Amino acid sequence: MTADGIVNHEFSAEDSAMINSTRIRVGRNLADYPLGPGITKAQRDEIMNRVVEACKTFEGDLKGTFYPLDGMSKETSEKLINDHFLFKQGDRFLEACNLNRDWPSGRGIFHNDDKTFLVWVNEEDQLRIISMQPGASIY
């Protein structure tokens, strides 16, 4: 995936002032694993471990830290929630389709050092990949 060929619309200063941030999100599920309502705890843990290993290979502006929800300190959790990065248990729709089983095992979040690239693991989708930046531009 590249941004080659995308032409960014330039907003006026007045219009840009109304936009706090721009986010592009994509949800994905890994081949050979059932979707969330049918996944086992062991499979969820395996997915998280695979993602942790993949995130360790990121370099440059993608380099960052993976935070498993299981064992996460209250301070870290509060910081990530206040930054609007961390998903949390309690969504009634996720509960209704049985996605909150074994909470918080096998779930986590990765973000790069600049907090402009995030990967959520095993929230609703097995992977939720998010690119974000302040302002209205996409580059």
Image (tube, rainbow, N blue to C red):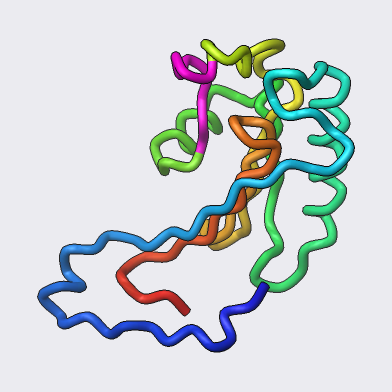
Residue positioned 53% across, 60% down in the render = 131
The answer to whether 129 is drawn above or below residue 5 in the figure is: above
Q: Position of residue 12 (x, y in %)?
A: 16, 82
- Residue 30 relative to residue 92: left or right: right
- Residue 59 relative to residue 138: left or right: right
Residue positioned 82% across, 35% down in the render = 47
Of 57 and 1, nearer the camera is 1
- Residue 71 relative to residue 24: left or right: right
Of 134 and 126, nearer the camera is 126
| Numbered label tally | 0
- Residue 56 relative to residue 96: left or right: right
In the rendered image, which quarter contains the N terminus?
bottom right
Q: Position of residue 116 (x, y in %)?
A: 52, 61
Q: Position of residue 41 (x, y in %)?
A: 81, 17
The answer to whether 126 is drawn above or below residue 92 in the figure is: below
The answer to whether 137 is drawn above or below residue 77 in the figure is: below
> Magenta segment, principal secondary structure?
loop
Of 116 and 2, nearer the camera is 2
The answer to whether 113 is drawn above or below residue 69 in the figure is: below
Residue closest to the far left:
14
Residue positioned 84% across, 43% down in the render = 31
Residue extent of the magenta highlight: 86-94
Q: Within the magenta stretch, is there residue 14?
A: no
Residue positioned 39% across, 37% down in the render = 82
Q: Position of residue 103 (x, y in %)?
A: 66, 14
Q: Within the magenta stretch, is there residue 91?
A: yes
